[in-house]
């Protein structure tokens, strides 16, 4: 099993659990939980594959469908244990965006796109499953708030291409790039960092 496939599966697991945790917070029924887990896990990757005219991964490889189902059951059964993990939704979401950023960048490279498009594809892969999840759960998607979310993915994608110019092996490039996404996201939350607002205090207080 290649590192690329392992990363893709780990990202699927992380986003599936993230989707389940969100659905549980909304008190959804089992069908709703499964749908949210599914769209969170494959939403961004499906959009990416459609745009680059590639085979949609989960439709060609049923391993991903089984992984989503297994992860959803795991998260539901162990939901009380997961509840003891501080900010478990944030944890799995952060791991997911890091892994899917790398997957998206590598797919862009394999398709022959220039770096800026590859970084956009990586960001899309990482973020748009969460966007669909939040919309279906009647929440404002994180990517549209001030939180540093997509920015972390972009920085990880840039780091990927910079590291390719070094003597590091591809496996180390992948690991370091993903770690950068996680680190930036964690630092942003710990130190309450956010993108600057374009609104004045008066505008923010107006109804």
Image (spheres, grey):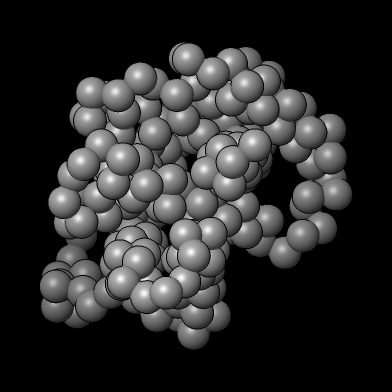
Whether residue 161 is situated above or below residue 60 in the rendered picture = below
The residue sitting at 49% across, 85% down in the picture is: 191
Q: Position of residue 207 (x, y in %)?
A: 20, 59
Q: Is residue 166 left or right of residue 95?
A: left
Between 81 and 42, the one lying in front of the other is: 42
How many numbered discs sit on the rendered protein? 0
User: Is residue 94 in view?
Assistant: no
Q: Position of residue 188 (x, y in %)?
A: 45, 77
Whether residue 76 is situated above or below residue 160 in the rendered picture = above
The residue sitting at 62% across, 52% down in the picture is: 92
Q: Position of residue 87 (x, y in %)?
A: 66, 61
Whether residue 10 is situated above or below residue 49 in the rendered picture = below
Q: Position of residue 11 (x, y in %)?
A: 56, 44
Q: Quadrant of the N terminus?
A: top right
The residue sitting at 28% across, 46% down in the picture is: 109
Q: Residue furthest front?
A: 167
The residue sitting at 77% across, 52% down in the picture is: 83
Between 95 and 57, the one lying in front of the other is: 57
């Amino acid at each position: 099993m290649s590192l690329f496939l392992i990363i893709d599966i780990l990202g699927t697991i992380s986003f599936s659990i993230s989707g389940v945790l969100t659905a549980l917070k909304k008190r959804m029924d089992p069908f709703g939980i499964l749908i949210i887990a599914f769209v969170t896990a494959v939403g961004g990757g499906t959009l990416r594959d459609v745009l680059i005219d590639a085979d949609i991964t989960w439709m060609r490889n049923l391993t991903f469908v089984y992984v989503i189902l297994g992860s959803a059951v795991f998260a539901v059964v162990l939901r009380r244990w997961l509840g003891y993990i501080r900010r478990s939704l944030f944890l799995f979401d952060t791991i997911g965006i890091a892994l899917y950023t790398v997957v998206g960048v590598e797919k862009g490279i394999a398709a022959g796109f220039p770096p800026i498009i590859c970084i956009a594809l990586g960001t899309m892969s990482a973020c748009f499953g969460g966007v669909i999840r939040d919309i279906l759960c009647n929440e404002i998607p994180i990517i549209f708030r001030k939180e540093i979310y997509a920015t972390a993915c972009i920085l990880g994608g840039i780091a990927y291409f910079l590291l390719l110019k070094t003597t590091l092996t591809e496996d180390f490039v992948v690991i370091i790039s993903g770690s950068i996404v996680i680190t930036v996201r964690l630092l942003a939350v710990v130190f309450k960092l956010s993108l600057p607002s374009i609104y004045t205090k008066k505008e923010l207080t107006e109804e």
